[in-house]
Image (tube, helix red, strand yellow):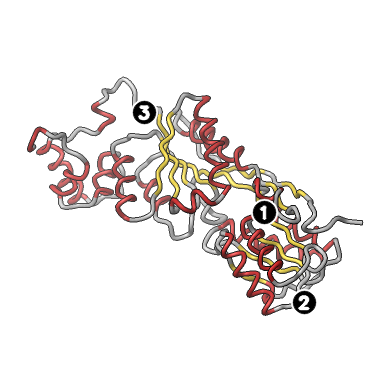
Amino acid sequence: MAGNRRPTIKTVAARAGVGRTTVSRVVNGSHLVSADARSRVLAAIRELNYVPNSVARGLVTSRTDAVALVIPESASRLGSEPFFAALIRGVSQALADRRTQLQLMLVRDQAEREQLTESVAERRVDGVLLVSVHCDDPLPAMLEEMGLPTVLAGRRDADEPLSYVHADNAGGAADAVRHLLGLGRTKVATITGPLDMDVGRSRLQGWRTAHREAGVPVRETLVEAGDFSWESGRDAMRSLLERVPDLDAVFAASDLMAIGALEELRRRGREVPGDVAVVGFEDSPHARWTNPPLTTVRQPVEELGGAMVRILANMTEPGGQRQQLMLPTELVVRESSGRRG
């Protein structure tokens, strides 16, 4: 090699004429590789004298004492949504107790996905904590194929095979809507999260469940999609008011969207909770300081991060098994919805 540089997975892939993922699968013993591709990769490894990091460290231990927290979102979103900050705190504390290093990785494009692939192939981390999972996200399947222990925050759907931890999204949403219906509200709208995420679909399911239980017709005109951001909450509230001007309550599937809805209601001269009651989901620090303070569903985000670490630690031990865990939620009633009685 020129300059005696140590060959990398990228140079092996180029020599073999395959992708980095294929090299990773060969290195990690995956069966999801054709015989021809495997032969070419092994030949390239021999020619280049490629040695994965885990082997270069010697066979004394296969552990790196490092874990990757992978978030397929933009840096601006990471900084603006309280959920991510709370999750990172929970993960960091749990890893500190285990003297394990945290590597935070944003995966926003193909180049960053390839960087993650290389880290996995060279075993620079013992496992991955994957956050913000969408149905069509290729990362969970890629990590599973590579044989790296992985725990999801949330799940892709109800049949998720990987380990995951999530809050009781459907149950928490149903509690929020039961609260509003119990206060005598008759036209309870909802601003959903992204419907290509289980969390978005589950919170919408909770809205529907509470209506059915109360014998109240489910009106699709009262449903508007958002993406968990403040802006989407504001825009969704505007659309709902234009479509159903006499609605008297709204359940937003995140606190940020609820805050956006409050802003739009204020702009239109609607009083909260007098004209329209508002409930969010998360119980972020912002919820206490809105005007009026926000009724919301508390989800234990820091505990969720800690539980992910514990499950991953178990999976990296001999005989460790996949686990799936749902954490309880709690309705926190404040002034934005009014109070019973």
Q: Secondary structure at mark 3?
A: loop
For image coordinates 65% across by 45% down, the residue present is 285
Q: Position of residue 247 (x, y in %)?
A: 76, 73
For label 2, the crowd category at 10 Å Cα-Cα, with few meaning under 14, some 14 to 19 and many 20 or more, is few
Relative to 17, residue 2 above or below: above
Q: Classify residue 173 as left or right of residue 56.
A: right
Which image quarter holds the N terminus? top left
According to the picture, the residue beneath numbered tag 2 turns out to be: 246
For image coordinates 25% across by 49% down, the residue present is 22
Closer to the chain start, of discs 3 and 1, is 3
Q: Position of residue 2 (x, y in %)?
A: 7, 38
For image coordinates 27% across by 24% down, the residue present is 57
Q: Position of residue 113 (x, y in %)?
A: 34, 50
Q: Secondary structure at mark 1?
A: strand
**Which quadrant of the structure image shows residue 275?**
bottom right
**Which quadrant of the structure image shows residue 9?**
top left
According to the picture, the residue beneath numbered tag 1 turns out to be: 281
Q: Position of residue 107 (x, y in %)?
A: 39, 50
Amino acid marked by disc 1: Phe
**Which quadrant of the structure image shows residue 276?**
bottom right
Along the viewing direction, whichever of 127 and 105 lies nearer the viewer: 105
Amino acid marked by disc 2: Asp
Query: Is there CB contact under 8 Å for labels 3 and 1?
Result: no
Q: Secondary structure at mark 2?
A: loop
For image coordinates 68% across by 66% down, the residue present is 190
Q: Which mark is residue 64?
A: 3
Q: Which mark is residue 169?
A: none
Amino acid marked by disc 3: Thr
Relative to 2, residue 273 above or below: below
Closer to the chain start, of discs 2 and 1, is 2
